[in-house]
Amino acid sequence: MGDTLFNLAHQTGFMNLTIGNVIMCVVALGLLYLAIVKEYEPLLLLPISFGMLLVNLYPPIMEEGGLLHYFFMLDEWTILPSLIFLGVGALTDFGPLIANPKSFLLGAAAQFGVFGAFLLAMLMGFTEAQAAAVSIIGGADGPTSIFLAMKLGQRELMGPIAVAAYSYMSLVPIIQPPIMKALTTEEERKIKMEQLRDVSKRERILFPIVVTIVVCLILPSTAPLIGMLMLGNLFRESGVVRQLQETASNALMYIVVIFLGTSVGATTSAEAFLKWTTIKIVVLGLIAFSFGTAAGVLFGKLMCKLTGGKINPLIGSAGVSAVPMAARVSQKVGAEADPTNFLLMHAMGPNVAGVIGTAVAAGAFMAIFGV
């Protein structure tokens, strides 16, 4: 009887729980609080934090044969990030970007944060491939961060990178406004932009096709991301496959989010996450995201000057990839200066451009490293 009780005691989770596991469980509970109580991007943060909790209570769940190991394999094969892009494309209206092609410049300007963080990461001791994988966090684009980390063979960094990227996506409404207000005057924030022109159905259908051809010919490695993004948008705009558009933007999207979120959270075991490298990644990610926001706003100020005050610099902050959160933040900050100012649709142009821009930046890194 004594041996039986001893064996049973050693089979409980308490016997294998380390101080590191306890710390990570507390972090997971904190993230669950933010997701449920504060509603910070709960669709992503809740499964991520629960996956974090599971792997630190029962590490074998992430080992070969464990449930979340097989979820993670779909990340490793870059299937889930690509399917997320399919859903994003099916959900997103590209009309504001088509109506105002200059938005592409604002989306491109926001990528300065990515390349600035790349150089800074190398100065901090990361290898070139590691620096590239870390710097893409600056786009506030979780799927692209996972995609690039896997393509560059940075499996051991994927957990901190993904958690940082999704955390900054969730914290866009907190991080961006102080930067936006610091770099603009109240008069600039009050600028009202002209109503966007109507975009024809022909333009909406041709846009995803043309972008796919051009980008994939220049950077073929971006085909999984750009291709799925544009396919989802073609589902939306063609009007002939409504069932596919609804499936991609609803049922499939939510299923993929469950798999992606829990598997990302499960990469944050105490042994893998509680390192100085993780802290450096989190700090670099914040710097990259802040630089990207600042670059977008500053380029927006330049365009404001060049157009004689026709462009509100606030929409430049939406050049990061967090769709549609970054565009909503532009609207919110603009409305604080003038409640009659409606910037949302104008900000959606740079926001969509930022999604494409971050994918192109990832493709550029893969081309540089011969992936």
Image: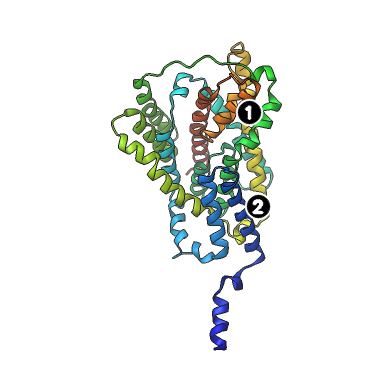
In the rendered structure, the answer to whether residue 77 lies left or right of residue 325 reads left
* Residue at 48% over, 20% down: 101
Rendered-image quadrant of the N terminus: bottom right
- Label 1 crowding class (10 Å Cα cut-off): few <14, some 14-19, many 20+? many
**Mark 2 belongs to which amino acid?**
Thr
Evaluate whether residue 154 shows in this view: no
- Label 2 crowding class (10 Å Cα cut-off): few <14, some 14-19, many 20+? some
Q: Quadrant of residue 275?
A: bottom right
In the rendered structure, the answer to whether residue 216 lies left or right of residue 281 reads left
**Label 2 secondary element:** helix
Q: Position of residue 328 (x, y in %)?
A: 55, 30
Residue corresponding to mark 2: 277
Residue 188's place in the image compared with 292, above or below, is above
Residue 322's place in the image compared with 307, above or below, is below
Q: Position of residue 123 (x, y in %)?
A: 68, 43
**Disc 2, disc 1: CB below 8 Å?**
no
Hey, which residue is sitting farthest left in the picture? 240
Distance, label 2 to label 1, CA atoms, is 26 Å
**Label 1 secondary element:** helix
Q: Position of residue 152 (x, y in %)?
A: 51, 47
Instruction: Between residue 150 and residue 144, name the one nearer to us.
Output: 144
Residue 210's place in the image compared with 285, above or below, is above
Hey, which residue is sitting farthest bottom in the picture? 1
Judging from the image, the colouring scheme is rainbow
Lower position in the chain sequence, tag 2 or tag 1: 2
Residue corresponding to mark 1: 295
Q: Position of residue 72 (x, y in %)?
A: 47, 55
Q: Quadrant of residue 174?
A: top right
